[in-house]
């Protein structure tokens, strides 16, 4: 049983790494491994989710995400999620890097003292939610993000990965440090 959970966990986070947590560095032919460390992991099959509790640390390449809790939700790949082709015939989604145990990752939620460290910048907040279908990350709960001497904050920060665009809502505040003082 434990071996199955460890196997599922490693595939789950490999999928998360591929889809959600891609870094902006040069593409590489070598796949990047993902490691998740937590005090406890619970797989809730009936609810289609995996829950990581207690000092969660996700590492993928140069990306490190810290949180108190991380919940990965997925939807089944199979009869319930058949897609229709232009000809009207049902098409089964292919199994691949976006599926885990016949399920596809749909959302990842990190809560409680969330800290994100990347080469491209850092962020802190109380809650970060990745929405796979929209390919976006929403930071709430006193979110602050900074990169190369620029620091932004507001009530809500939404990062659209595919568009390389960020929207700061609710009292946005931007601080730009002089070039020589940026850390």
Image (cartoon, helix red, strand yellow):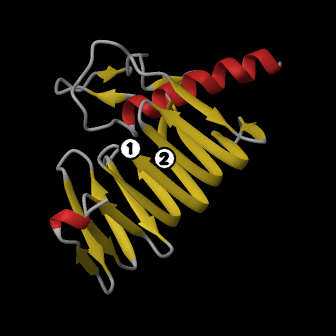
Quadrant for residue 132, please give it: top left
**Quadrant the C terminus occupies:** bottom left
Q: Is residue 93 above or below residue 43?
A: above
Q: Is residue 76 above or below residue 64?
A: above
Is residue 78 in view from this perspective? no
Callout 2 crowding tier (Cα within 10 Å): few <14, some 14–19, many ≥20: many
Q: Residue furthest right?
A: 1
Query: Residue placed at 17% from the left, 23% from the top?
Result: 87
- In this rendered view, identify the residue nearer to me: 171 or 176: 176
Q: Are marks 1 and 2 in contact (CB under 8 Å)?
A: yes
Badge count: 2
Residue that numbered label 2 is attached to = 107
Query: Residue placed at 55% from the left, 59% from the top?
Result: 114
* Residue 24 location (% of width, % of height): 25, 38
Q: Is residue 182 left or right of residue 115?
A: left
Q: Residue furthest bottom?
A: 171
- In this rendered view, identify the residue nearer to me: 108 or 66: 66
- Distance (Cα) linking label 1 and label 2: 6 Å
Q: Secondary structure at mark 1?
A: loop
Query: Residue placed at 40% from the left, 69% from the top?
Result: 144
* Residue 59 location (% of width, % of height): 52, 35
Residue that numbered label 1 is attached to = 132
Q: Is residue 57 left or right of residue 116?
A: right
* Residue 38 location (% of width, % of height): 71, 40
- In this rendered view, identify the residue nearer to me: 78 or 142: 142
Labels 1 and 2: the sequence-earlier one: 2
- In this rendered view, identify the residue nearer to me: 72 or 170: 170
Is residue 17 in view from this perspective? yes
Quadrant for residue 37, please give it: top right
**Quadrant the N terminus occupies:** top right
């Amino acid at each position: 049983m434990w071996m199955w959970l460890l196997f599922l966990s490693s595939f789950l986070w490999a999928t998360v790494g591929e889809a959600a947590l891609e870094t902006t560095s040069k593409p590489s032919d070598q796949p990047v491994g993902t490691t998740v460390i937590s005090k406890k992991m619970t797989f809730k099959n009936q609810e289609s989710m995996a829950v990581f509790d207690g000092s969660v640390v996700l590492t993928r390449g140069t990306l490190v995400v810290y949180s108190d809790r991380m919940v990965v939700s997925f939807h089944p790949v199979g009869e319930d999620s058949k897609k229709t082709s232009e000809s009207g015939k049902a098409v089964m989604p292919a199994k691949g890097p976006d599926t885990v145990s016949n399920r596809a990752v749909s959302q990842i939620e990190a809560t409680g003292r969330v800290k994100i460290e990347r080469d491209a910048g850092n962020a802190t907040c109380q809650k970060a939610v990745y929405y796979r279908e929209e390919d976006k990350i929403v930071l709430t709960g006193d979110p602050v993000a900074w990169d190369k001497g620029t620091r932004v904050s507001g009530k809500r920060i939404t990062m659209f990965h595919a568009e390389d665009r960020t929207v700061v809502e609710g009292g946005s505040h931007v601080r730009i440090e002089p070039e020589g003082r940026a850390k």
